[in-house]
Image (cartoon, rainbow, N blue to C red):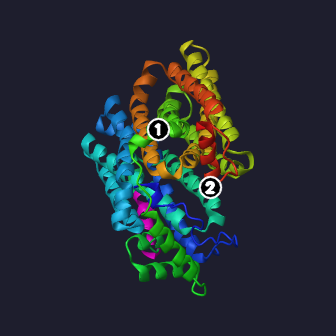
Amino acid sequence: MDAERVLPDCSSQNGVNAEKGSSPKVTFAVVCSSFIVLCCFFTYGCACGYSSPAESGIIHDLGLSTAEYSTFGSLLLFGSMLGAIISGKVADIIGRRGALWFAELLLIIGWLAIAFAKGVWWLIVGRLLLGFSTGVQTYVSIVYLAETIPPNIRGGFTMASQFMACAGIAVMFSFGNIIPWRFLALIGTIPCIIQLIGLFFVPESPRWLANVGRQKELEASLQWLRGKETDISQEAAEIQDCNQSLYKQPISRFQELLETRYARPVSIGVGLSFLLPWGGSNGVLLYASSIFDTAGCNVGIATTTMSFIQIPFSVLGVLLMDKFGRRPLLMVDLAGACLGGLLIGVGFLLQDLKLPVDLSATTVFVGMQMFFAFYAFGAGLPFVIIAEVFPMNIKGTAGSLAAFINYLNSWIVAYVFNFLFKWSSAGAFFIFSIIYALLILFVLKMLPETKKKSLEEIQALWTQEVH
């Protein structure tokens, strides 16, 4: 789905009066609806965090080979790629709320397939369903929040989405240390069921209702979100006006991305989407338990520490984003991940040199905590930047291309990680550190600062460069 069909470039969005600078008030209904939708990121975190603590149990009980478990772990990202591709069309056809219901039902089926798996194919089907569902719901939930939340609290809910994902990962790592993998999969169904029930109390997006011509339902949904005593006539009219002007805009094609005027923003978006997965973060997350075990660390303590250290760092990153800017924070994030990967590589090198186990294990432990702290610190930054740098008229096409490249490379890295790690534990992380160093140079050379710049001001940067 083109992004222009979700967030049209109107002078007033979500009822913001451009002349008065006012925003709709924050109501209890908005907070509750947004929280229920934000739980999508918690279920996404649960899916991401499952494979690491479950690895040893699944391999032992079902007799999986390294290749089979690598396939199982990486299918989450392959499924997410497929889900992201069709998520926009699903959301357009059955609505934002309908698409979230659809995704939650598939998530529950996926978790149950894993919990009652009799062989590798049950695991593959279940994991693929988890990935497909999270690919749909993470995109659609962002769309829903953007279309319903007043601008003055969007930043806080952006922070909450990253927090919820880290919380889901923490829950899986914590419970995964004390309960079998089948019960852990059943625990994964609990937030899905809760959210499935909660979605009955969430109104449909007023903007989608405007798109399909359901005027009365649009007004009812908007009234519920803004409060019974609020006059919604102006905001409803603005949504209708935006919707009418939206369909007068030409839909961009992939060929347009090759034009000279889009060279730099497309290079930034595609470059970040391609390089970031090769830093190894997805592979490290999926197989963290195996990494700690190979290093000689206490797996329970190490993974629990790793899961909880992400939460404060994710909050810190979002709080500092608008204060210090995207570019410097991304460079700090990449430098921290580079140093963390380097420490992990050194730790495994010490192990290869037959030096004291405590020294190598401690080095790997510290490196892993640093790696994941900075992963959480800047996990959302590249996607904020990618969303900002693309001009409005190519945002949908370019955004789809960037998402596809990111998921494709994430899947490849997640699949080959185990083989690379078995080839050389130290070498794998030295390679990841080199990729992060290259990313720092890429950011230095290509990325302008976009803090406090409107989308029009950012687009003007590319226009000036062409001329």
Q: If you read the primary sequence from the N terminus, does the residue marked by circle 2 or circle 1 appear first? A: 2
Judged by depth in the image, the label closer to the viewer, 2 or 1, is 1
Asked whether the viewer can see residue 305, the reply is no
- Figure check: 228 above or below 139: below
Mark identifier at residue 287: none
Q: Position of residue 344 (x, y in %)?
A: 59, 26
- Figure check: 144 above or below 394: below
Q: Is residue 128 magenta?
A: no
The residue carrying pointer 1 sits among few (fewer than 14), some (14 to 19) or many (20 or more) residues within 10 Å by Cα, namely: few
| Residue plotted at (48% across, 81% down) | 219
Under mark 1, the amino acid is Glu
- Figure check: 59 above or below 155: above
Under mark 2, the amino acid is Met
Q: Is residue 194 magenta?
A: yes
Q: Quadrant of residue 303?
A: top right
What secondary structure do most residues of the magenta stretch adopt? helix
Q: Which residue is mark 1?
A: 259
| Residue plotted at (70% across, 45% down) | 325
Which quadrant is the C terminus positioned in? top right
Which quadrant is the N terminus positioned in? bottom left
Q: Relative to the observer, which residue lies in front, 29 or 49? A: 29
| Residue plotted at (39% across, 41% down) | 255
Asked whether the viewer can see residue 164, the reply is yes
Alpha-carbon distance for marks 2 and 1? Answer: 35 Å
Q: Which residue is mark 2?
A: 159
Q: Which residues are magenta?
A: 189-202
